[in-house]
Structures are given as C-alpha cells and as structure tokens.
Amino acid sequence: MGVAKYIKNEKDEVQDVILQSGIHIKPVYTRKDLEKVGFDPEKDLAHPGEYPFTRGIHPQGYRSREWTTRQYTGFGTPEETNERFKLMISHGQTGLNVAFDLPTQMGLDSDDPLAEGEVGRVGMAVDSLRDFEVAFREIPLDRIGVGLTINAVASIMLAMFQATAEKFGFKKDRVSATPQNDILKEMIGRGAWVFPVKPAVRLIGDTIEYSMKELPRTNPVSICGYHIRESGCSPPQEIAYAFQIANTYIEEVLRRGHSIDDFVRGFTFNLNVFGNLWEQVAKFRAARKLWAKNLKERYGAKDNRSFLLRGIFGGGGYGMTKAQPENNIIRGAYYALAAALGGAQTTALCSFDEAYTIPTPRAALLSLRTFQILMEEIGLRDTVDPLAGSYFIETLTKQMEEKIVEEMKRVDEMGGMIKAVETGYVQREVARQAYEFEKGVQKGELIKVGVNKYTEGEKMEVELHDYRVGSAEEQIRRTQEVRRERDNRKVTQLLKDLEAAARAEKNVMPYLLECCKAYATVGEMTKVFKEAYGEFKEPSIF
Amino acid sequence: MERKIRILVAKPGLDGHDRGAKVVAQALRDAGMEVIYTGLHQTVDQIIQTALQEDVDVIGLSIMSGAHLPICEKLMKKIKEKGFEDTAVVVGGVIPTRDIPLLQKMGIEGIFPGGTPFDKSIKWIKENIKPR
C-alpha cells in the first residue's frame, strides 16, 4: 500500500523494508526461507520453455531471440511520424509502436470541433486510410511488427492496418499487428473510452475472433496492467487486474463457441517496470507462472502455446521525474534491466524528457541505445533467467504469486472485472492508492532522488519537442480532400451495412475492412458505433 | 460558520490521464475544501456550466495533453463573456516553464505543474481565494 517503506533506527540502519506489495524483505535469505514458502524446484520452476514457464517462455531465452524494441512513436502528421519511424528503424529498432493523437483515440476526425487544439499533439492523427498509407510508406511490414496504441476504436484501426498492408502488397498472413485493444483498463486508468462496457468488450471479441482466422500473426489484444499501475495500483494488483481483464476477454470469445487453444495464444500483455528492482523481477516470474496456471486450471487449455505469457515489459513512466530530468536516463537503464532480468520479449522505455512533453529524437534514441547496451554489451543475452535459484528471488517470487492470487480472488468475489469496473470498485481502489503514494513521496517516506533528496544542483533546461503549428490544418485539408475524392455513395452504403452488422451483433471486422478500403473516416465509423451502442458513463468514485 | 472553499476539479479536453486530478481532489478535500470532480472528457462549456451550477469559488483544470494553452484561452474567454470573473481559475498538469507567463497573461495566477507539493497549492488557494 502506498509507497515502499524503509524503516530505520536512530543510527540510520535499515530495520525493515516493506515493498509496495506489502511483502517484508529480510536482511538475509537462506535455504530455510525456500522451505518456508514451500518452494519446489520441479513444480515452481522446471526448465525455461517448460510449464509453468516461471523461467521464461523460450528454452534458450535471449540467446535464440533478442527482445523486440518498440519505442512509442508518433506525432503531428503521418509524414512526420513516417520520418521518425524510419529514423528509429535505421538505428536498429526492430518493431514499431504507434502513438495516436487523442482525437483519433477517441474516434473523432481531425476537423471535429471536439478535436480542436489536440490534433497531432500526443500522437499522429489518423482519419482515413490515406493517413496510414503515408505513415507506413516504405516500412517493411512483413519484417517489422506494429503495435497500435489504441483501444476504444482498435477494431477500426486493425481493419485500417490490414487494408494498408494489402494495399502495399503484403499478404495478410505475413503481417503482424498488436493493437492495444484493452478497453477495461482505459476505464480504470487511461480514460480513452467511448462505448459502454458490454459492447466495448464485444468489439474486442470481434477482433480476436477475426484475427484467429484472418490475421494469424496478429496479436489482437495487449492487456495492460501497465496503465493501471501508472494510475496507482501495486505490482501484484497490476498483474491480478490484467489477468482478470484477460479472463473477461477470454470468456467473451468462449461464449461464441471457440475453443481456448484456438485463440488465446494471440493474447499479449503490457506490464510496467518502475519501482523496486527485485519486486519487478519477481512479479514477471510469478506472472508467467500464474498465467500458465490460469489457462490450464481455469480454462483447460492444452496447447503449449496457450500457456505463454508474452508481452512488452517497459515504459516506467510513473518512476520518471520532472525534477533533474537527466536522472531519468539512469532510471530508464535500471528499469530496462528489470525487464531483461524478468524475461521481456518486447520492450520500450519512456524517454527522459517525457515528464515534459513527447520525446525529441535524441531522447528516443537514448532509450533505444539503453536496450542495445544491455543486450549486446553487458551480458543480458548470455544465459536465461540468471536470477533463478536465488534464495531471495525464489522466495519473493512465491510471495508475489500469493499476493496476485489474493487480488484475483477479490475480483472473482465481486463477480468479475466487468462488475468491478462498472461499479467503480477498481477505480476507487486505484485512486486511493495513488493518493497514499503521493503522500508517501511528499513526506519523504519513499526517496525519489532529485525530488525529495539530493535536490541541490543546477537547474537543467530540457530541449523540448515543438508542436508544429500548421500540422493540424494540413491534416484537416487532407481529410477533407479524401472526403471529396472518394466514392461517397459507396461509403454511405458501407456505413449502413456496418450499422446493421453492429446492431445485429455480427462480427463487425469484415464490414470495417470494407469501410476502410473505401476511405470511410475513423470519425464516421465511430459515429455508427455510437449510434448502435451508446456511450460509456463514468461511475462516480468520490 | 464560514463557508468552505468550493472547488471544481475539471478534466477538459480528450485526455484521460486522471491520476493527478483524483489525487489533488483527495488532497484538497483533506485540506477542508468542498471538491466537485467533473469526470473525463469535458468541454469548456460543460465545465463552465458545472461551475455555475455548483457555485464554485475556483475552477481547477488538470491538463496533461499539451493542449493547455488553447484550452485555457477558450475557458478564460468564455468566463469573461459570461461575466463571472470572480471565479478564479488554477491549472495543473504537464505545464512547461516557458508557458507559465502565457497562462499568467490570460489571467490564470495559480499554476501548479506536475510535482508541486500539496502544501504549496493548498496554501496558495487558501491565501488567494475567499469563499463567497
């Protein structure tokens, strides 16, 4: 609860350490501790690449496959974003992670009055297929997987991605997209929701069902404990809530008569890396094991591929500080170390200037270099799960597992995640803890270097990314041109078909694909859904 | 008995990052103020309407999206049009130092960028706002 606590005596010696998870850390660990938590190396560990996958999902770890690096990138117009994509790839980045501006995330076109002032600001603006054609120009989509950080309208953006790939001549079974597509966490933490809970979850079911057949290399959901933790929850809650959200999506697809082993291997996770290093590593190891167990015991999965917790472990935004921003470069390196020791398949880091604004190219490249140094210089590729067998880490992993199970149970008792979100239970829990955390930092209980200790020193000015005035107008001009040039009769008809499909609760993906191909806009398709589904109402939590 | 300071904590625009707004709302309440929280995705007009309905002394905006200048400009203009300039406006969130003078010029005096301690913003409000 609140912050991690270091209890000291009058001589400034540490008497007790209590992690944010509530777990007490001892000064010394021995074999006895392992016995006490009932550690069984056969059952709890096995080999890397074997059930329950505590040690990792690949037998050879990073030896057989380095992690994928995917800095969150996008701003202004699709032209500007395309340029930055190419810059990052030319410096060795191996995947993309697209940042969309807020109007796009909310399903509004750039010329919508509600979009005013926000076009191209925190990501790139996407209104129609024309924009994706520009953004992905000359990107080898058969080699570079693309994360799409979008949720409420992820179904639309996935269709847009497929339409783009096909237009460029890439086969749909060769391209790999990872739309974030996790609406429940938006309702808890990030706030980019549009439709009510139930139809929103149904849309996610549609994307999963569709990808299973049509886009076999696509990971249709990336469930984000990440943002829930950014919003204030503890590490075990991060995992517990993410798993319960995943279970909600699983049940939505099972309800349609599919078998678990046919689709769940497309699930990925997005998890956070800031905080106590050991706690993070134990969290990732415990999470891998519990995910495998969840699939086996709760859903009876049999296929080995169904058990694998794959994901992006990265970011660390809430750990970064505005004060003494260069310290964030060092923090980022340690957070990336936690991700590597935790066995991340994919990673990304918040850049050191992100407490100010979106990153400059210099800051984004520093994050990329951080990963490259870890993998290629420092030895993180040498051997798989290097902390395995440590008295401390194995004890902590078992304790973390217990904490996660407890939290999952709490959600089960509430009747599942949809209920927990609709009633505002999780939101309240998270907001309360965020307040406790902030009080802990302000009282100096948790040391943040440069914030509440070692605050002396020169004030550093950060070079800021400049929002280019004029980019919004360019974007609006392009969209209006698209609306003039396309076959509007066809678009109207396709939007009608989409609405009929939405109302009949058919899988909307094939209809969206046709709309995208005909240059219907994100705003137009979203409007159809709003009419069919209505809009989400936030539960009051105070 | 003296009336408590009534403050509307508002999230204007499309940004959904509300950790800061919710944390500040709790801190202001613990400091003895009456806090009303708008929830997300509020237009400037909706914020003004709620402020009028709730008869607040202060509107506190929380903005993380970089759109603070256009949003604040619009809000200040509407407040003038409606003639209730005696309602103070304060703003918090991701506010770069270079923008502070621009916000001050619009008539916003209480500016609390991310990382401002609770004590500092609470003290400022208590010293500068008289409950009606």
Image: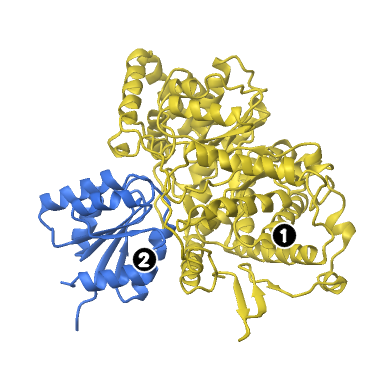
Residue A282 disc label: 1
Note whether A409 is above or below A356 in the view shown: below
The residue drawn where x is 39% and y is 38% is A530
Report the amino acid beneath label 1: Ala
Q: Considering only vertical position in the picture, is B132 above or below A94?
A: below
| Chain holding disc 1 | A
Residue that lies at the very extreme toward the bottom in this rendered image: A10
Is residue A468 toward the left or the right of residue B49 in the image?
Answer: right
Tell me if B131 is positioned left or right of B13 in this view.
Answer: left
Which quadrant is home to the N terminus of chain B? bottom left
| Residue designated by label 2 | B25
Measured along the vertical axis of the image, is residue A108 above or below residue A1? above
Decide: is A37 above or below A297: below
Task: From the viewer's side, name the closer residue of B51 and B120.
Answer: B120
Name the amino acid, label 2: Ala
Q: Nearer the viewer, mark 1 or mark 2?
A: 1
Give the x, y percent position of residue B67. 33, 44
Q: Residue at x 11, y 49 (%)?
A: B81
User: Judging from the image, what is the letter of the chain drawn in yellow?
Assistant: A
Chain painted blue: B
Q: Mark 1 to mark 2: distance in Å? A: 34 Å
Instruction: Tell me the crowding category of disc 1: few under 14, some 14 to 19, or many 20 or more residues within 10 angstroms, Cα based.
Output: many
Residue A102 image offset from top left, x and y in percent: 40, 40
Answer whether residue A255 is visible to the viewer in this image.
Answer: no
Which chain's residue wears label 2? B
Please identify the quadrant where the C terminus of chain B is shown: bottom left
Q: Position of residue A371 (x, y in %)?
A: 65, 43
